[in-house]
Amino acid sequence: MRKSCSKDFNNLDSFIINDKILNKFYYKLDEYQKDYYESILDPNIKFIGVNASSGSGKTWISVGGSLELLREGKINKIFYLRTPDDRSLKLGFLPGDQMEKSQIYFKPFYDIAIDFGIRPEEIDLARENESIILTTDICLRGTNISKSAVIIDEAQNMDSDTIKLVLTRLHDDCKAILIGHKLQNDQKNEDGSTFDKYIDYMIQKPWAKRCELKKNYRGEMSTWADNFQLN
C-alpha cells in the first residue's frame, strides 16, 4: 500500500498530485501492475525493464510512479525520453525549434499527467524549472544525469548503441525504466527485440528487475489485433 505524502514538486506549489487521485490510481492496478509500480518506488532497484503489449499500462505506471518519487523528494527530476523513429520521420520537415519539433514524442507524458490532475501549463512550468525534462536521445552525449527517474519509452525502436548511450549517462542514484513492446517496432532495420535482450543483460545484477504485465486494458479488439503476426 502506498504512503500518503504532502510534499510538492520542488516547491512548485501548484504542481501537486492529490492523494485521492494517487490512491484511486493504486487500487485499480492488477497484481502485476502493482509489482511494477512498487518496484519503481523501491529504493533498492535501480533498473526496471518491461516488454509488454499495448494497453498494459507500462507508460502510464512509469509516469505515475516517477511523479510520486518526485513528489516525495526521492528524486530531483523526471526524464521522459524517446528516440526519433522512421514512422515519425515520415512527417518530413517540421517548423519550429528543437523543442517544438520534438513535441510529437511527448504527448503520452502530457496525457498521463493530465490523468493525474496535472494541467498542461503546470507541466510546462515544471519543464521550465527542469523538474521534468522531456527529450530525445539526440543531445545526450556528454550529459550527466543524477537523482532522476529516467523513463526510456518505446525502447523497441532503439538499437543497442542508443540504449547504451542513455544508460551510461546515469549515476547510481537514478531509477532507469526501460519500456517497450518488441512486436511493435517502427524502425526499418530493427526487429524490436534488441531492447528485450538488453533487459536480459541488465537483470543479471541484483539491483535490476524485469517486470511482467499480462493484460491489454484497451480491450478485446486491441488485444486481438496486437497478436497478429505474418508467417
Image (cartoon, rainbow, N blue to C red):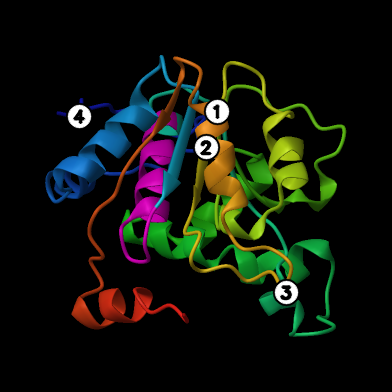
Front-lying residue, 55 or 17: 55
Q: Is residue 60 magenta?
A: yes
* Region of the chain picked out in magenta, as a range: 52-69
Q: Dot 3 corresponds to which residue?
A: 86
The kind of secondary structure element at disc 1 is: helix
Q: Give the crowd class for mark 2: few <14, some 14-19, many >=20 residues within 10 Å.
A: many
- Residue type, numbered disc 4: Arg
Q: Is residue 11 visible?
A: yes
Give above or below for 166 relative to 108.
above
Residue 177 rendering spot, x and y as whole percentages: 50, 38
Contact check, label 2 and label 3, Cβ < 8 Å: no
Instruction: Assign the magenta stretch its main secondary structure.
Output: helix
Give above or below for 35 relative to 172.
below
Contact check, label 2 and label 4, Cβ < 8 Å: no
The kind of secondary structure element at disc 2 is: helix
Residue at far front of view: 231
Question: Which numbered dot is residue 194?
Answer: none
Between marks 1 and 3, how big is the CA–CA gap? Answer: 27 Å
- Residue type, numbered disc 3: Asp
- Residue type, numbered disc 1: Met
Between marks 1 and 4, how big is the CA–CA gap? Answer: 27 Å
| Of the image marks 1 and 3, the number of the one nearer the N terminus | 3
Front-lying residue, 217 or 146: 217
Between marks 2 and 4, how big is the CA–CA gap? Answer: 27 Å
